[in-house]
Amino acid sequence: MITRIAVLVSGGGTNLQALIDAWKAEKLETGEIALVISSKKGTYALQRAADNGIPSMALERKAFHNMDDFHDAMLEALTRYRIDLVVTAGFLTIIGPKVLAAYEKKIINIHPALIPSFCGKGFYGLHVHKAALDYGVKVTGATVHYVNGEIDGGEIILQKAVDVLPDDTPETLQRRVMEEAEWELLPMAVALLCRENKHEDEPLQVLPE
Ligand code: GRF
């Protein structure tokens, strides 16, 4: 059974690229990237989808009267593309309660720090790495976790630590966390969940009496 994956993005999409590369290298188990949703038009992530023949769409909050309509449109798109697993990778818009309910334990996110450090409201992009440097931690990293109603609050799936170096700037640290942790961890977590999804479909084994 194929696991149809949607990747939700807002920017450059380097994590999307890591997933595409893993998929092409047959490292996503049953996973297939079936849809890319960008919260903005014209992102480089949409270009990456086009370059790889992946269906994509921009779903902009401002195109809808209210959050409810926006979330309904998201759920409609995920349903229309028969999505089994949702991956948010740098997606800067909140996932609504209806989508969360329809995809319980089927939505994961990558955060560029070791949760519970440097996470929650306001901790996105370079802010995360700036906060880590300001605090003076010597180790940071990345976390893949389930998405629930709380920002960066869902159960942790995988984590990887990365050293902070004395001359780091938020930019150099961000890059090292991506290269050494995020791009490795996200495809690994997706493969793990695809493997589980495959087993969900298998009939229960009947043990001989
Ligand atoms: C990554 O650092 C990710 O951990 C965070 O947002 C950033 C997205 O980068 N959630 P990209 O668009 O995948 O390059």
Image (spheres, rainbow, N blue to C red):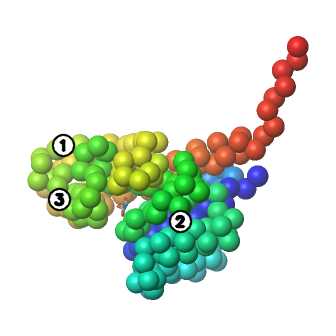
Residue 102: give x, y in percent of width and height: 59, 57
Residue at label 3? Answer: 130
Instruction: Please tell me how many numbered marks the rendered image carries.
Output: 3
Query: Quick check: 118 above or below 207?
Result: below
Q: Amino acid at mark 2?
A: Val
Query: Quick check: 65 above or below 30?
Result: below
Point out which mark residue 7 bears: 2
Give the foreground label among 3 and 1.
3
Task: Give SS at disc 3.
Answer: helix
Q: Looking at the image, which residue is at 22% across and 57% down?
A: 129
Mark 3 or 1, nearer chain start: 3
Q: Which is more toward the observer, 175 or 78?
A: 78
Q: Amino acid at mark 3?
A: Lys
Residue 140 seen: yes
Inter-mark Cα distance, 3 to 2: 26 Å
Q: Which is more toward the observer, 163 or 57?
A: 57
* Ligand 1 image position (quadrant): bottom left
Residue at label 1? Answer: 138
Q: Amino acid at mark 1?
A: Lys
Mark 1 or 2, nearer chain start: 2
